[in-house]
Image (cartoon, grey):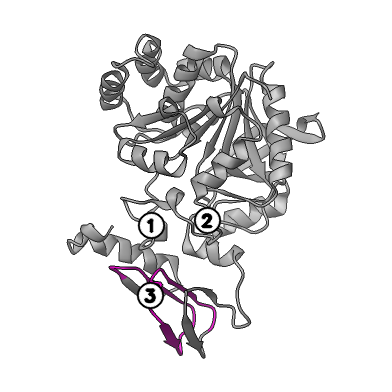
Amino acid sequence: MNNNFYCVIMAGGVGSRFWPVSRNSSPKQFLDILGIGKSFIQLTYDRFLKIVPKQNIIVVTSSIYVDLVRKHLPDLPAGNILAEPYRRNTAPCIAYAATWIRNINPDATMVVAPSDHFISNDALFIDTISSAMNYASQRDELFTMGIDPTRPETGYGYIQCNMKDSTTVNGNIAYKVKTFTEKPNRELAQVFVDSGEFLWNSGIFVWNVNTICRALEKWLPEIYSLFKDGGRYYGTPEESAFINKTYEDCPAISIDYGVMEKTSRAWVFQASFGWTDLGTWESLYLHAAKNSDRNLIKCPDSMIDTTTDSIIVSQEKDKLVVVKGLSNYLVVNTEDVLMICPRDEAKFKEVITDLAVNERSKYM
């Protein structure tokens, strides 16, 4: 295993789209949504242990989730948890991690990945990421992972490939990036899928640490300038105070918008390792097993009758869930919330909005 390989797991998101199971106090990455005995962050950590030495795995998370990270990843060295005092999107997160890693190892190559995505083919994932890291370690280029689209999904970003400019790395094809598009409408998404030139943007990045630092310095100097001198504080008792001040002054911007959409050095690997961003109840419904009535049921005990195309979830071990006569509904039961609403993402978003408007934020 290459000691110059590092992994950065981004684990600071709130994940309100799985409410009421996910909450501000326990977001999606710390939940076992799939019911397999491991949280998303545990699955992500275990996957990268096969690519990167344990001591080189870094988790960047909100300061309020540090204890949750320690609970879910007890083997992770305590010093490898980087705490963000405020949410500032992915560019500051990556700037913090990249300068922190460069301070330890200027020869490092890093993979950056969200903590809450699902991968169905771990062996192919490991092969693809390892090949990309070996390739990126010797090149002044920025790489991301693109997924073959299977439907005109409006919840994902898309990457357009330059089909005339490509390379092959251990059987994995990488294309020069032509354009990025964030969450198109259904009609445009269908055009993208039909063209054969677009991939879903997985949000997984690979680059050597010096290349990403140079890119940040060029395209986001207002952010890079805040972190560039962090080496004198990283790993010392003064790191927390430095980061608190840095994040107070730091703008919120994504790495995609701030760097990847501007640089001419962006490449995308066409990946087929079974990636899914299980970010909503709808996406879970799409990929999870369902019964003969097309219901997704996750309840310790239930009686479901004349009900179709619905999602029915209960976290109460000693409660019988009885549902009769529903179609296309979302029923979620937790210790303090029972939600029953149409299985429609617009209606669900209204519920989340209404929580704040009606001063029910304690349930978020």
Camera-side residue of 56 and 108: 56
Q: CA distance from mark 2 to mark 1?
A: 27 Å
Residue 192 in picture, x, y percent from top left: 65, 50
Amino acid tagged 3? Cys
The disc at residue 22 is 1
Image quarter of residue 135: top right
Foreground residue among 29 and 357: 29
Q: Is residue 303 above or below residue 24?
A: below
Give the extent of the magenta segment: 308-337
Report crowding for label 1: few under 14, some 14 to 19, many 20 or more residues within 10 A (C-alpha): some
For the residues labelled 3 and 2, the Cα–Cα distance comes to 24 Å
Relative height, residue 285 to residue 46 (above, below): below
Q: Secondary structure at mark 2?
A: loop
Q: Amino acid at mark 2?
A: Asn
The residue under the point 51% across, 86% down is 307
Residue, disc 2: 185
